[in-house]
Image (cartoon, rainbow, N blue to C red):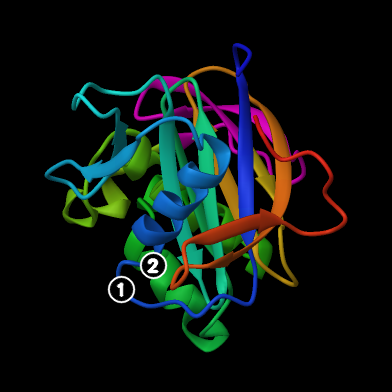
Amino acid sequence: MSPQQACLYVFNELAIAKGVGKKTLAVLLKYLYPQKILRVKTCKSGKPFIVDEDGCASHLYVSISHSNSTLVILLANIECGIDIEFMRYPEKMLSVYAWVTHPEDRVENLTAKEFLRSWTLKEAWLKLKSFGLEFGLDNIRVEGLNRFYEQQAIEINQELLHAQFFSVAHSDQTCVLSEEPLTLRKIAMTVDTQTGLAMPKLSDKESEP
């Protein structure tokens, strides 16, 4: 994998259940690296990481997120964080936004897209930093978030980071956050976690990072 490049594997119409992210990642690693023995571990915060057969940390960094029936797995050569969300309860948007956003960071005339951008950005930051939700989303201070730009540099808790916003399914908002700019390659995948088989969809001829 070249410097500052990452592959985003997208699994749509997947039955989401507890542990499906780690299980799907394990299947994906077998598909991508059939000659290697790579295992998925988690740190105390729940963040996954990849080790080789000797238990040594791999050169691959990983971040996982899922919402509704969509699972996204990001593999990169630098630390990263990803979050995907759908608007599940639009009637609660304003109250949730006030709860998770510092008063000085709130915007007027909030739209659904802006709400999801703010939420996924903060969740991606927690994953990048290996923090849990107990950190408090309202304690994550964001400056310079532009409502129009898909790729932008943003100051989060006084640190300059790089964010990318996009959609991988109908009506979702996905955010990738990293300390350096990333070139993303999105690949649609199918998987059978029961048999341990993973493969790209027919429209995607190339699959390996």
Question: Mark 1 — residue?
Answer: 18
Which residue has dot 2 on it?
A: 20
Circle 1 packing at 10 Å, graded few (<14), some (14-19), many (20+), is few
- Left or right placement of residue 116 versus residue 135 in this view: right
- What residue is rendered at 48% in x and 31% in y? 35
Any part of residue 127 in sight? yes
Identify the image quadrant of the N terminus.
top right
Count of numbered badges drawn on the protein:
2
Residue span colored magenta: 142-163
**Marks 1/2: CA–CA distance:** 6 Å
Say which residue appears at 41% left-offset and 76% top-offset. Answer: 95
Q: Is residue 157 magenta?
A: yes
Q: Position of residue 141 (x, y in %)?
A: 37, 38
Image coordinates of residue 94 in percent, x first then y, are 49, 74
Name the element at disc 1.
Answer: loop
* Amino acid bearing label 1: Lys
Residue reaching furthest left?
44
Are discs 1 and 2 less than 8 Å apart at CB?
yes
- Residue 10 shows which numbered tag? none
**Closest to the observer, 206 or 151:** 206
35 to 63, vertically: above or below: above
Q: How would you rate the neighbour count of disc 2 (Cα within 10 Å): few for under 14, some for 14-19, many for 20 or more? A: some
Give the residue drawn at x 50%, y 76%.
Answer: 93
